[in-house]
Amino acid sequence: MAHKSPETDNVKAANEAYYAALSARDLAAMAKVWTCAPDNILIAPPVNPETHVGWNAIRRQWEKYWPLFDAFSVSMQVSTVNINGPVAWVHGVETSKRRRKTGEVTTSTNYGTNIFVKHDGRWLMVFHQAAVLPDAAS
């Protein structure tokens, strides 16, 4: 069971800020969510994921990926928040909806994991991974 602390709400808020920036496709907001360091890791997109190491690589991935879509949203139903000192990790089920510029609409249910570190009193992301959950009907 996850340890409850006064910081749990702060970690949840940082997690929500990530998904808000992601859904808005807002690089400036993303830069406020991440530590923007060479050791940041993004493993995405959830289908055929690639590992992007370092803030510059992560930023380039979004600059390449986001323009493919007219609409894009991702949210997470948080199942667990764990905090151990200056490190927190969140995992849960993501719902992703995308509409390509071609009009094609796709959705996916993903398992997401996010890792944050406390830096100058703020929880900032250092790691995100999303993996598509298999369709229950298949």
Image: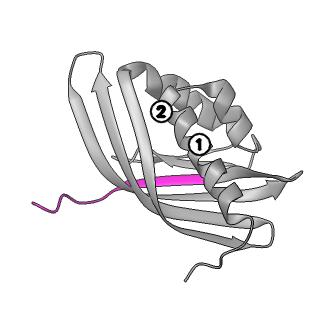
Of residue 35 and residue 49, the one placed in the foreground of this image is 35
Depth check: 70 or 77 in front? Answer: 77
**First to last magenta residue range:** 127-138
**Residue 53 at x, y = what percent?**
63, 46
Q: Is residue 21 above or below residue 75?
A: above
> Which residue does the numbered mark 2 point to in the structure image?
23
Magenta stretch: includes residue 132: yes
The residue indicated by pointer 1 is 18
Residue 109 vs 45, above or below: the answer is below
Image coords of residue 59 (percent x, y) = 62, 31
Q: Quadrant of residue 67?
A: top left
Q: Residue furthest bottom?
A: 1
Q: Callout 1, which amino acid?
A: Tyr
C-alpha distance separating marks 1 and 2: 9 Å
Task: Say if residue 136 shows up in the picture.
Answer: yes
Q: Is residue 131 magenta?
A: yes
Residue that appears at 61% across and 41% down: 17
Residue type of the residue flagged with mark 2 = Ser
Secondary structure beneath dot 2 equals helix
How packed mark 1 is, by other alpha carbons closer than 10 Å (few <14, some 14-19, many 20 or more), is many
Q: Secondary structure at mark 1?
A: helix
Residue under the image location 89 percent in, 51 percent down: 120
**Quarter assignment of residue 92:** bottom left
**Quadrant position of the C terminus in the picture:** bottom left
